[in-house]
Amino acid sequence: MESLIHSPDVAQSSADSLPVKSCSKAKTPECSDSLPENEISESHIQKFDICPRNSGLVILKPNLMSKNKEKRKEKERSISGPKGDILRSGMVLLKNYLSISEQASILKICRHHGLGQMGFYQPSFGEGGKMHLKLMCFGAFWNPETNQYGEVRLPVPQEFLELVDRAVTDSQSLIAENSRVKDVKSILPSVQPDICLVNYYAPRTGRLGLHQDKDESRKSLDEGIPIVSFSIGDSADFLYSDQRDAEKADKVTLKSGDVLIFGGKSRHIFHGVPMIIPDSAPKLLLEETNFRPGRLNLTFRQRF
């Protein structure tokens, strides 16, 4: 989900990359830093730091009241366990599912690779239009100019895969508690992701038009293997519908730490992000990571 696949929402703007002056250390999977042939050239990939240390960006430290409020929220989250809403058949929203420490770890890994030779770039299309986001790929690389997956550039980090598996299992348990279906996987199948698209949305310009994710294999699509989405940073309005009509679409706000999963009968929904809500990221997360204003979205999918 929230990939730029088949999205009509493009712009003529250029990438706003920043010079890199430092890089935090993070545990990352072993991978090759060589650039595959016949794919996005190095000139398209500009060093873009999602957690800049010396960029001139001003990130206000949270006041004591805000910090205490967020700490209480974190404690309640750990005690009460996952809270989820079943939005429709096969579609589950896990609220505040990822802890601040888990979100920070994800940011560190994405930052490490985002500064590399195969890091973030602003996707463009044949006629020169550019997306209102920046993209980085784990697993099979997706080429927006051909609408096809290529070879594996970076492996999907094991830490990410474990979080996905936990989220899907908890979602299946939630569905089982609220339905009489014996085989919960008939509503929400399990998934073994081999692709992770990492999208960065700027707070005032980032958006993505209604689209379907349908470039996986016919087997994966027919079986309704779910898309799993992590939200980190600023909140976003998320639209979803059976039709490609924004005015008729349902809307939900995705906040930092939320996990959204849709598969089964909801696998082919149209979905998009019309806007990012500025200054809505958890202050504790910003203080710990120096994450730049905006939203990071990770979408996991199973190609075959």
Image (cartoon, grey):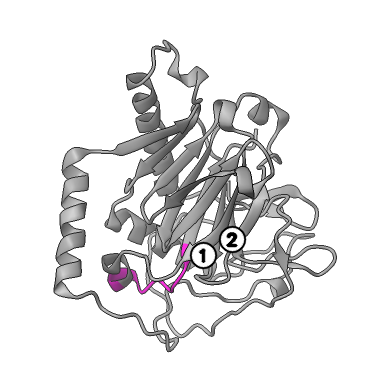
Image height of 48 relative to 234, above or below: below
* Residue shown at 72% from the left, 64% from the top: 10
Span colored in magenta: 287-295
Kind of residue at disc 2: Met
Q: Is residue 179 left or right of residue 242?
A: left
Q: Quadrant of the C terminus?
A: top right
Q: Is residue 284 left or right of residue 264?
A: left
Check disc 2 and report its element: helix, strand or loop.
strand
Marks 1 and 2 sit apart, C-alpha to C-alpha, by 9 Å
Choose between 197 and 258: the one closer to the eye: 258
* Residue shown at 28% from the left, 38% from the top: 82
Choose between 282 and 29: the one closer to the eye: 282
The disc at residue 38 is none
Kind of residue at disc 1: His
Magenta stretch: includes residue 110: no
Image height of 278 relative to 61, above or below: above
Of the two numbered discs 1 and 2 in the rendering, the one whose residue sits closer to the viewer? 2
The disc at residue 136 is 2
Image height of 138 relative to 185, above or below: below
**Which badge, 1 or 2, is on the more N-terminal residue?**
1
The quadrant in which residue 240 appears is: top right
Residue wearing tag 1: 113
Check disc 1 and report its element: helix, strand or loop.
helix
Q: Is residue 177 left or right of residue 260?
A: left
Picture coordinates of residue 125 (x, y %)?
79, 63
Picture coordinates of residue 208 (x, y %)?
62, 58
Q: Are marks 1 and 2 in contact (CB under 8 Å)?
A: yes
Packing grade of label 1 (10 A; few <14, some 14-19, many >=20) is many
